Image (cartoon, rainbow, N blue to C red):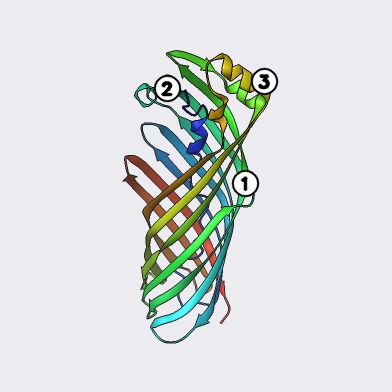
Amino acid sequence: MRRPLLIACALTIGPPPSARADDAHGVDDPRFSLSLRAGILQTDDDAFDATWYRPAILEGSGWILRSPRRWLGGLQLYGMAGLESIDVAYREHPSSYQESLVGIHRADIRVRRGLALGAGARASLYDDGRLRLSAFADLAEPLRASEVEVDALLIDLEGLKIDVAKAVREHASVSYRGRTLRLGLTAAAGFRARGLRWVPYLTFGWLRYDATIAFETNDRLKTALAAFGVDASVLSERAIVESNVFFAPGIRVDLSRAWSLETQALIGRYDGTWVAAGAIGAAWRFGP
């Protein structure tokens, strides 16, 4: 019976804040940008319901190469430091663990708030001051592994529901670490209305996510698991790799040449999973 006892912890693979910086920062804008954002992401399917909280993400970017030409007019570097925490509610259907006879009836898990760092580069493919197209690549990962708190964990062992949450909390340590790699394009168009400059944009591309769930247990928990016929190897380190296309529409509103507001919202269904996300922030641009 090698069904992972704490496979619910693998559902904390939500991406950390990506090093997205200022998606619609054009070559003709002030050279540098600093922004502060906050956001939330919710996913829901038949197996789990998860919410990622991102209360503060500080981002900065700067054009290191710029030219007045429209095509291939600049190269930008950017970076990010952000906080994130995750809540997960998870259930398995008996049909998914019928052969092993042991599965998770319900698990409630929390990943403690941790700091994530990221960096990337963006190249301006076309920018005439109104229409913009850029390509980017970036990487983001936590500064250190985050601790996972298990609030509830009910194991279904041949129809018998066993609460092992207390044993796990007292006799095991669970940690999580993930890394996000993105490659993609951002298309934007600017126009003026009501005395403001509006820049709607769409970012789309490919995302790869690598995560590791690590377990540290003592002999007492291993003995308790063996008493129920569960091999302690279910607590071995787990590696998760996910990759998929993504897209994120948004709009930037320039209050002046130096200050702007930005918001993003997304609702969609991917491979049977509902995803809803929202973010809002403010940016300050400066320099020549």
Q: Secondary structure at mark 2?
A: loop
Percent position of residue 193, x then y: 36, 70
Label 2 packing within 10 angstroms: few (<14), some (14-19), many (20+):
some
Percent position of residue 35, x then y: 55, 63
Q: Earlier in the sequence, mark 1 or mark 2?
A: 2
Residue type (three-letter) at the residue carrying disc 3? Arg
Check the image and report above or below for 141 versus 43.
below
Q: Please name whichever residue, 26 or 217, is drawn nearer the observer in this view of the structure.
A: 217
Percent position of residue 131, x then y: 35, 75
- Which residue lies under the disc numbered 3? 220
Check the image and report above or below for 165 versus 267.
above
The answer to whether the residue labelled 1 contacts the one labelled 3, judged by CB atoms less than 8 Å apart, is no
Residue depicted at 63% across the width and 22% down the height: 221
Residue type (three-letter) at the residue carrying disc 2? Ser
Q: Earlier in the sequence, mark 2 or mark 3?
A: 2
Percent position of residue 111, x then y: 57, 38
Asked whether the viewer can see residue 171, the reply is yes
Residue depicted at 50% across the width and 20% down the height: 154
Distance from the alpha carbon under mark 1 to that under mark 2: 35 Å
Check the image and report above or below for 47 versus 13.
above
The answer to whether 258 appears left or right of 183 in the picture is: right
Check the image and report above or below for 152 versus 274.
above
Q: Secondary structure at mark 1?
A: strand
Of marks 1 and 2, the one in the foreground:
2
Distance from the alpha carbon under mark 2 to that under mark 3: 23 Å
Quadrant in the rendering for residue 233: top right
Of marks 1 and 3, the one in the foreground:
3
Distance from the alpha carbon under mark 1 to that under mark 3: 30 Å
- Which residue lies under the disc numbered 2? 100
- Which residue lies under the disc numbered 1? 114
